[in-house]
Amino acid sequence: MSAHPLSDIAHWRARPGPSGLPSVCSAHPLVLEAAMRATLPADLPLLIEATCNQVNQDGGYTGMTPADFRARVETIAQMAGFPVERVILGGDHLGPNPWKSLPAAQAMDKADAMVRAYAAAGFTKLHLDCSMGCAGEPASLDNVTTSRRAARLAAAAEEALPGGDTPAPVYVIGTEVPIPGGAMEELGVLEVTTAAAATETVSAHKKVFVEAGLDDAFARVVGLVVQPGVEFGNHNVADYDPAAARELSAALADLPGLVFEAHSTDYQTRKNLSALVYDGFAILKVGPGLTFALREALYGLDAIATELVPEGRDRTLRQVMETVMLADPSHWGKYYEGDAEARRRLRHFSYSDRIRYYWPNAEAEAAVAQLFDLLNERDIPEPLIGQYLGHLFPAVRAGEISRHSRALVLASIELVVQDYIAASFGVHREAGAAPSRMRAVPFSLQKPQS
């Protein structure tokens, strides 16, 4: 069994090359392709993660099982010319969350089956999250209960491994994370995880894992989820403050072999992302920020199509998306506040980007396909790109980005991924130095045997 590419991530910053890596949390094909295009020239593996609500043994809200998700990623990699052996598949928040309305015993049985499905499909970076209470329990559970349930899921994963050359999975523990998809309220100052809370979480999990005979599995715990003080809401972003996280960052000295995993890093500046990596928050999760860039580019093309082909369709993409979201408010209704006009704006332009749940809708997919068909492979005039996709204009003028519609969408997403890649290569905030040179030696990860 080969070694896992992330098994020594805690030691990356002691040698040339990357000090951390982004975690791409999206199932959208264009986002995945753009992440592959951006990562291809870098000396990094591509970590792609699915969440428990998004992908599970029952299909999740994408309709995909872990095996289905793996097949999608491999198909896109083949199309994009990205080596599949450089892809690491991860599972995020694996635990009872999708079934927390059930009694704990039933919810944990479902979580057990989910983790087995992830492990059997060759997902080798597993975040175990059993912090949430189930029916009749407190909303948040104590460390001991959380650790015991996490150990049960680790045991399930270990039993379901595909074998062969697939490396044994690495685990991430800890649960001090923001609300999935971003906060609902205007953000103020966030409470950073204390150093004591971080060390207590690790200690509690280690004790329970060892008691359960899972010493080997615990030896493969490489990360701890903490709150470094970053988050985004519907309207604003809480920026990373290195001074506020200094005590937490220093706690890594007492946690050998571990790095911190930072959730909801979407919309942080490249400087902030670099500072996070420098301070030991080596795994940077990003999801809504990528689909926000996707939506931005699609809406830009939508306006361009109206200029170029005004009689080409009955409804714009934005009009279709409004209809689709109003017909099914389940993914945005309880998250967006204000009067009717405020909620209308949020449906399309919120940082929380809950429109992302609607792109797989058949009507939405047809509208996007129609948009691409209208623009086809025509060279879009530069002035229109400048007007509606201004963030891409300099690179278009320089000949670095094609003026074709699909290339413009991919480039918009790639710009976000490139911020994370640059941050992963150890930009020191004191010196403001450029990213260190990307080495040519590739990471590899064997795919599971069928």
Image (cartoon, rainbow, N blue to C red):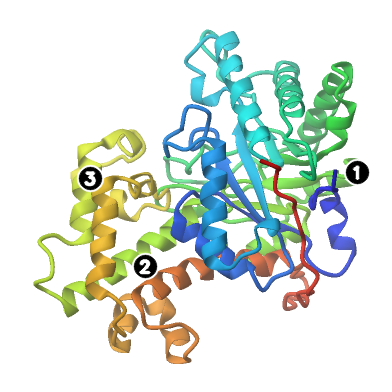
Q: What residue do we see at 49% from left, 33% from top?
A: 53
- Mark 2–mark 1 CB contact (< 8 Å): no
Q: Secondary structure at mark 1?
A: loop
* Furthest-bottom residue in this view: 398
Give the mark nearest the N terminus, 2 or 3. Answer: 2
Foreground pick, 174 / 222 = 222
Give the residue pinned by disc 3: 324
- Mark 3–mark 1 CB contact (< 8 Å): no
* Furthest-front residue in this view: 450
Q: What residue do we see at 78% from left, 29% from top?
A: 201
Q: Is residue 345 visible?
A: no
44 to 114, vertically: above or below: below
Q: Amino acid at mark 1?
A: Pro
Q: Secondary structure at mark 2?
A: helix
423 to 57, vertically: above or below: below
Looking at the rendered structure, the number of numbered marks drawn on it comes to 3
Rendered-image quadrant of the C terminus: top right
How far apart are the alpha carbons under marks 2 and 3?
19 Å
- For residue 16, the mark is none
Q: Along the horizontal axis of the image, is 16 left or right of 197?
A: right
Give the mark nearest the N terminus, 2 or 1. Answer: 1
Give the residue pinned by disc 1: 256
Q: Amino acid at mark 3?
A: Val
Q: Amino acid at mark 2?
A: Ala
